[in-house]
Image (cartoon, rainbow, N blue to C red):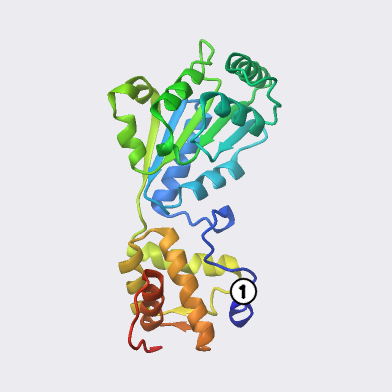
């Protein structure tokens, strides 16, 4: 609705995990570096945690774009599967048709695939998103999959991505063996105040209008106070604010427009919200 008004080629504050909009803050760059290191060095298990909306899935999509042709990847979005269904989903995402709904046969298929990829000099990576929702017995089955290795290196790099509850779950006695196998861990922290401003400018630039829309300093302060550096919340507020700017025919986003946007998001009503 507002793209033409601001001269944008696309909406800058969608909440989808589009790696084209990835803003490499200090913490996001470190997370990506940890992932690349864990894959390159064949470390086996890697965990990435962070609050809801912190940008974990976007980092993983950026990782997929950075993997070379010698890296095979699979991305599992639904962690609430049975052991057999998980094996089927993994094989299918690697482009392999499961032979039968039999765990032993599916495991042999996966093992054969991994050995063939190793013979080609390829690395294999499995990313499991929302891993905090996985049952403990399913996480333990992933540990068993990690037993597929040679005398010198892992055949399979498994990245568990989840909210802080994942770290809590991994600390339980039932998952001691899995926890001991996690070689690389990283927690994605929220953006700082200055990074929040840079993040907003970055997304506007990617969308095609870096100098057209101006977020005033009090507006940026209000965004940071509300979103606390969580990218998804920043996107939601900024998208709503651009809509209000369009309605009021202004390209300067004021604190008043931000407060109005926040009030609508939270389902509250402000008596009067000035444009400036």
Q: Is residue 65 left or right of residue 15?
A: right
Label 1, on which residue?
Answer: 8
Question: At which x and y percent is residue 51?
Answer: 37, 50
Residue drawn at x 39%, y 49% is 27
Query: x, y percentage for residue 29?
Result: 45, 48
Residue 79 in the image: state x and y as whole percent: 49, 36
In percent of width and height, residue 46 lies at 44, 32
Q: Is residue 30 left or right of residue 127?
A: left
Q: Nearer the viewer, residue 201 or 78?
A: 78
Q: Is residue 43 above or below residue 29?
A: above
Is disc 1 placed on a helix, strand or loop? loop
**Which quadrant is home to the N terminus?**
bottom right
In the image, what residue occupies the spot 49% across and 35% down?
80
Local crowd size for mark 1, using a 10 Å CA cut-off: few (<14), some (14–19), many (≥20): some
Residue at left offset 41%, top offset 62%? 233
Q: Residue 259 appears in which quarter of the rendering?
A: bottom left
Quadrant containing the C terminus in the rendered view: bottom left
């Amino acid at each position: 609705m507002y793209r033409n008004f601001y001269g944008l080629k696309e909406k800058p504050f969608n909440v989808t995990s589009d790696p084209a909009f990835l803003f490499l803050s200090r913490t996001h760059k470190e997370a990506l570096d940890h992932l690349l290191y864990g894959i390159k060095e064949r470390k086996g298990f890697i965990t990435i945690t962070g609050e809801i909306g912190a940008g974990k899935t976007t980092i993983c999509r950026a990782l997929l774009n950075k993997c070379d042709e010698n890296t095979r990847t699979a991305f599992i979005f639904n962690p609430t599967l049975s052991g057999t269904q998980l094996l089927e989903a993994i094989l299918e995402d690697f482009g392999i048709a499961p032979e039968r709904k039999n765990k032993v046969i599916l495991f042999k298929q996966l093992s054969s695939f991994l050995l063939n990829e190793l013979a080609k000099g390829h690395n294999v990576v499995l990313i499991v998103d929302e891993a905090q929702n996985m049952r403990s017995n399913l996480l333990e089955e992933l540990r068993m999959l990690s037993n597929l290795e040679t005398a010198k290196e892992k055949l399979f790099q498994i990245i568990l991505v989840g909210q802080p509850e994942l770290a809590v779950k991994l600390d339980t006695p039932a998952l001691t063996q899995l926890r001991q196998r996690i070689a690389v861990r990283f927690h994605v922290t929220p953006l700082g105040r200055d990074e929040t401003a840079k993040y907003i400018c970055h997304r506007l630039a990617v969308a095609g209008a870096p100098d057209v829309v101006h977020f005033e300093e009090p507006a940026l302060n209000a965004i940071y106070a509300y979103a606390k550096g969580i990218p998804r919340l920043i996107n939601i507020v900024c998208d709503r604010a651009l809509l209000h700017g369009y309605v009021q025919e202004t390209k300067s986003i004021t604190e008043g427009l931000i407060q109005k946007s926040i009030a609508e998001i939270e389902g509250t009503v402000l008596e009067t919200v000035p444009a400036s």
